[in-house]
Image (cartoon, rainbow, N blue to C red):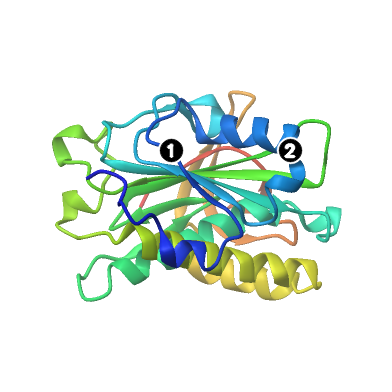
Amino acid sequence: MAIPSDGYPRTAARSPRVQVVETTDSTNADVVAAVTHDPAGWPHLSLLVTDDQRAGRGRLDRSWTAPAGTALAVSLVVDASTIPLALRGWVPLAAGAAMTRAIRTQLTGHGGTAELKWPNDVLVDGGKICGILAEAVPETFDTVVVGAGINTRMSRADLPVTTATSFAAIGAECDDDRLLADYVEHFGELLSHLSSGGAERVHRDIEKLCTTIGREVTVSLPDGTSVRGRASRLDADGRLVVESGTIETIVSAGDVVHVR
């Protein structure tokens, strides 16, 4: 499915700038460069979207590609200047929570269940349908670009791994405009709570959506080691707390596998 001729009117009603491109290597790279060159031209909640991203990147420097027309790639600008530094670690998790809610709305009446996997992957019935990558614009702590890749019309045969899924693979339709509009709206609300000191509410809302909490997990850490135990909660900074017997490990970054 090509980019709709009438654009994204629902999304445009919630975002100050919606730029659509037919194809690009990386929406995140494009937006980081654009914000660096013209910050005033890319205000808070501006976004760039395409359904043909050729060289996307995921967390832990993984590559992310999809056949043209089968997935949405969107990068959104966050003005974090009003969010206290101590709370900015919640921004990527808030993005995942917002996308989880947007995808749940798309699945209303279908029967699929969208859940958040820590820190910000979105799963549907256990399969990954969306990944998110947040990165700060160089030389500033106040602007963050949040990229998301959503598997929309990807056939089961085109899914990159057996643990992935898509709307098409589960027989569901996706209204791209409504999906993005809901994502922007929910994300904006969570960011507003962080700006106004409402971190406890954001913490509570994200924990409710997070299917990782209460699960037995194995976490592969950046240093090559791993931790296995029960994911008990998120701490005040959004980090995952894993209990192994009487030992608690605080995980700020890592690749989580749900054991059961």
Quarter of the image containing the N terminus? Answer: top left
Q: Is residue 26 visible?
A: yes
Residue 176, given in percent of the width and then of the height, sits at: 34, 57
Dot 1 lies on which element? loop
Residue plotted at (14% across, 34% down) = 157
| Residue most extreme to the front | 6
Residue 232: image tag? none
Residue 162, given in percent of the width and then of the height, sits at: 24, 37
> What amino acid does circle 2 point to?
Asp
Dot 2 lies on which element? loop
> What amino acid does circle 1 point to?
Val
Quadrant for residue 17, please give it.
bottom right
Residue 87, given in percent of the width and then of the height, sits at: 78, 58
Compared to residue 205, the image places residue 157 above or below, namely above
As rendered, which of 113 and 78 lies closer to the eye? 78
Q: How many numbered marks appear?
A: 2
Q: Is 159 positioned to the left or the right of 232 in the image?
A: left
Residue plotted at (74% across, 56% down) = 237
As rendered, which of 196 and 179 lies closer to the eye? 179
Please rate how many residues cluster around mark 1, counting C-alpha atoms within 10 Å: few if below 14, some from 14 to 19, many from 20.
few
Q: Is 73 positioned to the left or the right of 78 in the image?
A: left
Please rate how many residues cluster around mark 2, counting C-alpha atoms within 10 Å: few if below 14, some from 14 to 19, many from 20.
few
**In the rendered image, which residue does mark 1 sit on?**
21
Q: Is residue 137 visible?
A: no
Q: What separation in Å lies between label 2 and label 1 (alpha carbons)?
A: 18 Å
As rendered, which of 39 and 135 lies closer to the eye? 39
**In the rendered image, which residue does mark 2 sit on?**
38
Q: Is 236 positioned to the left or the right of 234 in the image?
A: right
